[in-house]
Image: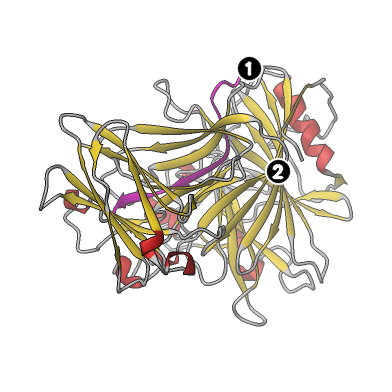
Amino acid sequence: MTLTRRAFLTTTSAFALAPAMGLATGSGVSFDRTTVIAQARDLASRPYAMRDAVPQPWQNLTYEQYRSIRFNLERGLWRDTPTPFNIDFFAPGLYFPRSVQILSVEDGVATPVGFDLSMFNTSKDVPDLPSDETLGFSGLRLRTEMHRPGLTDEFCVFQGASYFRAIGLDEAYGLSARGLALNTGEPDGEEFPEFTRFWLERPTPSQRNMVVHALMDSPSVTGAYRFDITPGEDCVMEVEATLFGREELDHVGIGPLTSMFLFDQTNHTRFDDFRPAVHDSDGLMIENGAGEVIWRPLANPTRLQISSFVDRNPRGFGLMQRSRTFSDFADLEAHYHRRPGLWVEPKGDWGKGTVTLVEIPADQEIYDNIVAYWRPATPFAAGEQVDIAYRLTWGHEPHRTSLPRVLNTAMGDNTFGEGRLAVIDFESTPLLDDFDEIDVITYSPHAKVTDGVLQRNPDTGGLRLAFGFEPADRDHVELRAQLRRDGKPASEVWLYRWTT
């Protein structure tokens, strides 16, 4: 499906105009994807109106009180039926003051799922909370049989704004995706669109995929989303989105990814921490429209920095976690070595734009300080319908090419020379077996760089490239390195921005 744009006409229906907080359980209405598109189109034709918040006692919950409200798995939607998936729900309140409505779709008929406090187990510290069937939820969690025959495991969560995350087999939750990013890193602040309503299509007994629809609303834009989700070794999502701009959208992030990077061997000296590294992702990978494969190690800068990689019709991009052993982190609780990578594969013609990387200073691992997305070169006009499609793959290594990968990057003082030293480890592959035939390319537009020294790393079996650079009085230096053989790429292109 191509990223397409066209003017939209306003259409309304009784269901499209139903207030978000006023749906009653027990009544069903016909449903298909055009239902969500019609609602998004209608919302965009009217001024933005923020949804009502849940009652104040829900908003006043403490963190400990809120986290003690846990869904009773025995009450999962479709549990103990032939349906191969079941659904948990999250209560509203605290960080989620505006609830979302959830509907179950069966045989083309959508029926609201009513809130019931008895769905949840609560501690004795939780006060009496007002509720009825229209209260709504803060999100949902998908489960299916994965690791244990006859038992279900979670693999995907939608909760908060337009955020969602997923995992493959034997993985722990890490980075998140979003429906849309708006004005990320802009001085006037970022706008966070919200999923306000979900429709869950009930799968047949033999079905291995789950379809979730979502309605998105925001002051600047509305949207209708369809997620076709297949769990497994990798969790694969086919995403279709139809957007309607209330106003011109100059800074739009398509396929936005959000992650955390605190430190590794490039900046460990800034953190007094027993662990060798702390991050959900360690690099941005891009396969651009020309077929060039780029690896950009992530950084935790001391001030906001934004990197833009100009392209046309990218083949894909993603935030990856390539540190995969326990010893890389030595963390018995966080299990960072089990965090998934996430690859975005565009469908159709995405045209000109940039893969944009935003790196935000952070002093604790609780902050998601990394954002990556596709920013179209041409703004979306007000009154324009834009159709977008892409695939998301969550997994241990969700995208591979034939080129040797960068495994690790380290930085430090050049002990035996002037300036700084960059050290890059490449994985072991037959392409690098005879490194006497390998040419080293190092370059910087800002600083003098050495030719580099290439050696075999006995620990990895691959090659290690070390080269020096002299920043002088510059506060940042862009660096580029690649291995080539017979004039052709023999590794990914390594890009890095060094900062003081």
* Mark 2 or mark 1: whose residue is earlier in sequence: 1
Give x and y (percent) for residue 346.
66, 43
In the rendered image, the quadrant that contains the N terminus is top right
Is the C terminus in the top left, top right, bottom left or bottom right quadrant? top left
Q: Which residues are magenta?
A: 247-263
Residue 326 as seen in the image, left or right of residue 251: left
Q: Nearer the viewer, residue 242 or 87?
A: 242
Which mark, by number, is residue 247? 1
Tell me the quarter of the picture where residue 143 sits: bottom right
Residue at coordinates 56% horizontally, 33% vertically from top-left?
A: 311
- Mark 2 and mark 1: Cα distance apart in space: 25 Å
| Foreground residue among 244 and 110 | 244
Percent x, y of residue 61: 42, 48
User: Residue tagged by mark 2?
Assistant: 347
Coloring basis for residues: secondary structure
Give the residue type that dot 1 points to: Glu
User: Residue 223 lies in what quarter of the image?
Assistant: top right
Residue situated furthest bottom in the rendering = 149
Q: Residue at x 43, y 24 (%)?
A: 186
Work out whether 9 lies above or below 110. above
Q: How many neighbours does mark 2 have within 10 angstroms: few (below 14), some (14-19), or many (20 or more)?
A: many
Position of residue 253 measured from the top left corner of the image (x, y, whole percent): 55, 33
Q: Is label 2 in a helix, a strand or a loop?
A: loop
Q: Is residue 340 left or right of residue 239?
A: left
